[in-house]
Image (spheres, rainbow, N blue to C red):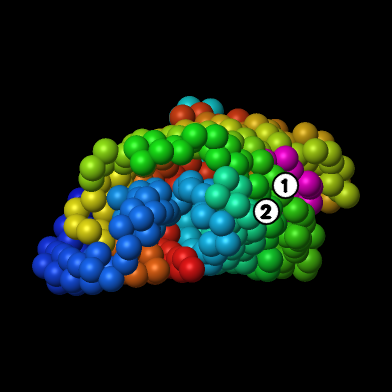
Amino acid sequence: MKHILKQTVFCVFVSLSFNNAVIAANNSHQGHQHNNKPHHQHNKHQHMDHSQHSVVSQAPISVMADHLHHKDGWMFSYRYMDMKMSGLQQGKDDISHSDALQKYMMLPKNMQMKMHMFGLMYGWSDEVTLMLMTHYLSNDMDSVMRMNNSAQNHGHMADMNMPMMFSTSSSGLGDSKALVLVNLVGTADYRIHYQFGLSLPTGDIDQTAQTPMHQHAMLGYPMQLGTGTYNVLGGVTGVWQYQQLQLGSQLNFDSPLSDNEQNYKPGREWRWHNWAGYQITQCLNMTLRLTWLDKANYSGQDPRLNPMMMPTADPSARGFEQIDIGLGVNYQIGQHRLSAEWSEASQLKVDGMQMANREQLVFAWQLSF
């Protein structure tokens, strides 16, 4: 709740700061366009802005492939995502590290993932848009390890558990995606489109790091940069708009085609975004997003990992179901869009033992031309 209040105060502050200047500037710009363009060209421009570039039509920045572009239209996007995870959960319940160390020798304590995402969209026609995405990852994880030592205690040997902390990291290019977006229905008030594509295994799955156990230890599944698999992607998006209000929903799936070179593959994934957006000024809107995510366990196993040592090496401890809520802001100035969104996830249940708390912050810039 404290984070939501902070984000709300930030958004209201931005709104009040830019309100008068933005309205004046846009009214002047629109008046100039109205006086210098034929009537039929003006209407066409309004319709294009309403469906693609108007601030009221913008979804939360964490929702990908939410719109199409007109023929020969381009959009470049850059997103920076910072996600933090901490704590442990087993099934539906939290578990302490001291209790979890009775089962595993090593445990994740917290993890931070920083992602730089680059996207390109091109309007092949008014009905079809092509989309490419790739990203650069930087992962850092703090872990705790149970050290079994023997100590002399009044002439007797006693076993003592002495946890120690250590850190690992990985970085590099992640997997890439190629998508085709196809319009089904499009009016001034609502639109529906579907998307399909392929995830390409451009991310490395051979990341190692120094640990107390080994100089070049193979890192667990969350610390790898990619999946090593070709994945089928698909989804459908629906958006309804009325004056300053937008309501949207998007259902996506991600399913690997076959095992990677290490004889395992990640589980299929379903993601369901639902959001509401409200236009505060002609250039500023706020969004509220609710997302349900369901991921299945991995099948197969990386032979270089021992699932008995740590839960991040266990392919049967990768599935989970979660709900996350996000609060965002979009600011449109000409062909540029600046966006930010904060979100926090609640794990409904996890398979095995996994990190429990997830908090994410996204900043983005988009250019349409």
Q: Is residue 144 above or below residue 300?
A: below
Specify the quadrant of the image occupied by residue 175.
Answer: bottom right
Q: Secondary structure at mark 1?
A: strand
Q: Residues within 10 Å of mark 1 (few under 14, many from 20)?
A: some
**Residue at horizontal 65%, vertical 68%?**
171
Residue 134, how many percent across, how many down?
Answer: 64, 61
Q: Residue 300 versus residue 116: which sits nearer the camera? A: 116
Classify residue 88 as left or right of residue 222.
Answer: left
Residue 189, how many percent across, how many down?
Answer: 34, 37
Q: Which residue is mark 1?
A: 198
Q: Which residue is mark 2?
A: 177
Residue 308, how many percent across, how many down?
Answer: 73, 40
Q: Is residue 239 above or below residue 149?
A: above
Whether residues under marks 2 and 1 lie with C-beta atoms below 8 angstroms apart, the answer is: yes
Any part of residue 79 in sight: yes
Residue 70, how many percent across, how many down?
Answer: 52, 55
Q: Which residues are magenta?
A: 226-233
Any part of residue 100 in sight: no
